[in-house]
Image (cartoon, grey):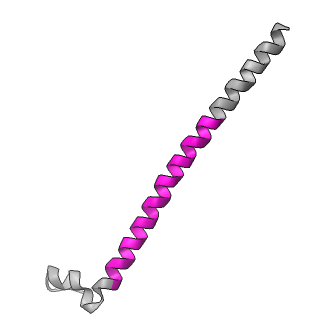
Amino acid sequence: MQFDSISEFINMGGYAFYVWLAYGVTFFSLGTLVILSVRQKRKVLIEIAKKIQREERLKETRSNK
């Protein structure tokens, strides 16, 4: 489908509300998913680092006895 002007493109043949709403919901959902995934990954990496430090401290205390 070709549009003769920018205003026709934005209007989307009378279906602009549904088209732009669908784009908005999609990009919002994908953005939220990316942000939450990055936060969760950061939390998991921090927990892994803490667990490794605890295990190293336990090994040190066991070897000192």
Quadrant of the rendered image containing residue 44: top right
Q: Nearer the viewer, residue 4 or 31?
A: 31
When the figure is inspected, residue 19 is found, relative to residue 61, above or below; the finding is below
When the figure is inspected, residue 52 is found, relative to residue 44, above or below; the finding is above
Query: Percent x, y for residue 49?
Result: 63, 31
Taking the magenta stretch, the answer to whether it contains residue 30 is yes
Query: Percent x, y for residue 38?
Result: 50, 48
Name the quarter where the C terminus is drawn.
Answer: top right
Query: Percent x, y for residue 25?
Result: 41, 72
Residue at 81%, 8% (x, y): give it. 64
Any part of residue 24 in sight: yes
Query: Percent x, y for residue 21?
Result: 35, 78
Taking the magenta stretch, the answer to whether it contains residue 52 is no
Residue at 45%, 66% (x, y): give it. 29
Q: Which residues are magenta?
A: 18-47
Q: Is 23 on the left or on the right of 47, as rendered?
A: left
